[in-house]
Amino acid sequence: MRLSMVYSAALLLNTGLVRGASIADPDVNGKYWIYGEGISAAFVPYGASISDLLIKDQYGIQRDIVTGFDNASYYTVDKQHPHFGGVPGRYANRIKNSTFELDGEKYHILANENPTHDNPDGLDTLHGGPDGWDWRNFTVVAYTKNSITFSIVDPDGKEGFPGEVVSFITYTLGNLTWDFKMVAIPTTKKTPIMLSSHTYWNLDGFANNQTQSALNHTFFLPYSGQRVGVDNILIPTGDILPNKLGSVNDFWSAPKQIGHSFSDPEIEGNCGFNCTGYDNCWLVNREQSGPYDWRKDGFIARLQSAWSGIQLDIFSNQEAFQMYSCNGQDGSMALKTTQGLFDNPDFPRTIPKYGCIVLEVEDWIGGINQPEWQRGSKQIFEPGGDPYVLQASYKFSINTTATPF
């Protein structure tokens, strides 16, 4: 029996996923639905992706508040591939020069972003490479009414990463909650691991009859007075920058609408060269308040819409948080049939620029190339050591106190 199979069986038995688990067929659209109190969600094996999340707004109308595709088959043929709802891996976000060094050995990962004449494949690696985890089909290994677990075996050398990694992604719905746990185990060699959930949100379900933009959403990062400095192609420079009071990246001093600072000249280039908006990684400094239980001692991020009244509070064991304001959307991506307006010619049934928000719980981006940050215990793992574990709880409620756009 292969070592990866041994680890797989052991983890399933130790976590109780085998006992009582039921592997059922997906629906006619290839989606696996799970249900909680006041919430339901659908997932697809491609990228272990969330494709639908249904919740009622302040008027009792059900909204689908995440982006995706109507049919699971389209994930494999979509040419834009905006990482809708998937798990980027084995290393999320960007790797500078597509290289890193581990125990004196230099590894070259396949590049897939920022191509140039001299580097046609790209200058860096984004979300694990051209065939990263959210480009691949996971296996459903457990499926119940309120929970689903996906698994993937990432081979030694895939995309250039050392060693085999076995991973399990578990999604669970509760009382207006979506919880997930991501576990990854290196089986043969020491290797970097950093995962995340790359879900795109519009808390209005694109049904707001005043705007399709998500810039009207209010955002709050109460523990994030600092962020990772990046260059003009969003590669970490090694600098940790202050989010000064009142600056465009100040979401810590008070909640504010994501579009609030778009008239500030500082917002130009804030998300890279010739880019207006956000694609930034804020640090989560929970330690400032002393010991804490990440599950209940205060959210690390809050997203809220006054129009729908839907509020999302995020709790996580991770120490960084990336927010992307969908600067790259251009109106060519179709909405799902569960979203948007059908009788308003002013709003095409597509996702416009700034029409969504990506929220990513993760560790400090690019940490494998910044040894001075001392993130090794959070990002480098080896056989026989502790596994990589990411946990998060997304809690939904109705709150209409945010200032409308």
Image (cartoon, rainbow, N blue to C red):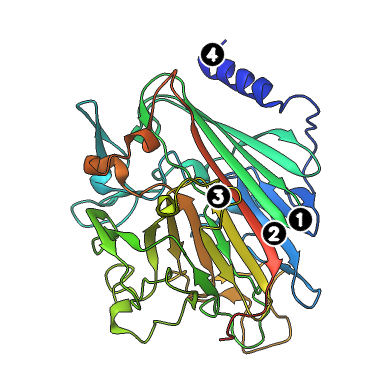
Q: Is residue 308 left or right of residue 278?
A: right
Residue assigned mark 3:
86
Q: Where's the N terminus, which quadrant?
A: top right
Residue at far top of view: 1
In the displayed structure, 33 sits above or below 340; it is above
Query: How many residues crowd around disc 2 within 10 Å: few (fewer than 14), some, or many (20 or more)?
Result: many
Kind of residue indicated by mark 1: Ser
Q: Are marks 2 and 1 in contact (CB under 8 Å)?
A: yes
Residue assigned mark 4:
2
Q: Are marks 3 and 2 in contact (CB under 8 Å)?
A: no
Lower sequence index among marks 4 and 1: 4
Q: Is residue 188 left or right of residue 334?
A: left
Q: Spatial distance from mark 2 to mark 1, Cα to Cα?
A: 6 Å
Residue assigned mark 1:
40
In the displayed structure, 379 sits above or below 223; it is above
Q: Spatial distance from mark 2 to mark 4, Cα to Cα?
A: 37 Å
Q: Are marks 2 and 4 in contact (CB under 8 Å)?
A: no
Residue assigned mark 2:
53
Lower sequence index among marks 3 and 4: 4
| Residue 81 seen in this snapshot | no
Lower sequence index among marks 2 and 1: 1
| Residue 97 seen in this snapshot | yes
Q: Spatial distance from mark 3 to mark 2, Cα to Cα?
A: 14 Å
Q: Residue at x 69, y 88 (%)?
A: 344
